Amino acid sequence: MKMQEVEQMVDRVKGKDFSQKNNAWISGDPHFLRGIQWTVSSVRCMMYGFGDDQNPYTESVDILEDLVIEFITEMTHKAMSIGRQGRVQVEDIVFLIRKDPRKFARVKDLLTMNEELKRARKAFDEANYGS
């Protein structure tokens, strides 16, 4: 990621306080997951997988992590507000992304693959354990 891109992202998230973690989910704080380590390592791996340096700048990882957490939190809140109140279902997520062809195609592929894996596991279990 180029430094200019990093600076632009910093400008977008500047002024946000990410240190507050108490009751963050309840209060709707999109950055309550900030301290979870899996996101940092996942973001680093994804950045490398998409062509960044194997050890990207910490600032780049932090900014991208903030954007990912914000996206996931916003989608979750939107999904909770449609369909059955307070519950997130796959159909709600599909409904939210239906107008974004790239995301919709990716979700469709992942759901199809998930169903294929379920069928394969079931067939494997039946063959090995004779249900």
Image (spheres, grey):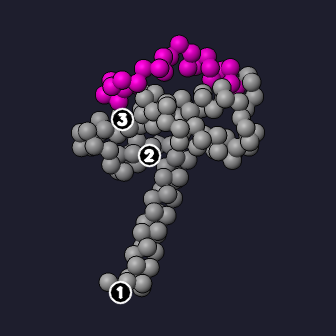
In the displayed structure, 83 sits above or below 9; it is below
Query: Which residue is denoted by mark 2 in the rendering?
Result: 98
| Amino acid, disc 1 | Gly
Residue 6 is a magenta residue: yes
Where is the C terminus found, in terms of image quarters? bottom left
- 81 sits to left or right of 43: left
Total labels: the figure holds 3
| Amino acid, disc 2 | Arg
Other-residue count near label 2 (Cα within 10 Å), few / some / many at <14 / 14–19 / ≥20: some
Q: Residue at x 47, y 20 (%)?
A: 19
Query: Which residue is denoted by mark 3 in the rendering?
Result: 78
- SS type, badge 3: helix
Between 83 and 36, the residue placed more toward the observer is 36
| Labels 3, 2: front one | 3
Among the two numbered marks 3 and 2 on one chain, the one whose residue lies closer to the N terminus: 3
| Residue 55, image x, y percentages | 73, 38
Between 24 and 89, the residue placed more toward the observer is 24
Q: Residue at x 43, y 66 (%)?
A: 115
- 10 sits to left or right of 18: right
| Residue farthest toward the top in the current orientation of the protein | 15
Figure quadrant of residue 26: top left
Q: Which residues are magenta?
A: 5-29
Q: CA distance from mark 2 to mark 1?
A: 41 Å
Query: Which residue is denoted by mark 1 in the rendering?
Result: 130
Q: CA distance from mark 3 to mark 1?
A: 43 Å
Residue 16 is a magenta residue: yes
- SS type, badge 2: loop
| Amino acid, disc 3 | Lys
| Residue 10, image x, y percentages | 62, 20
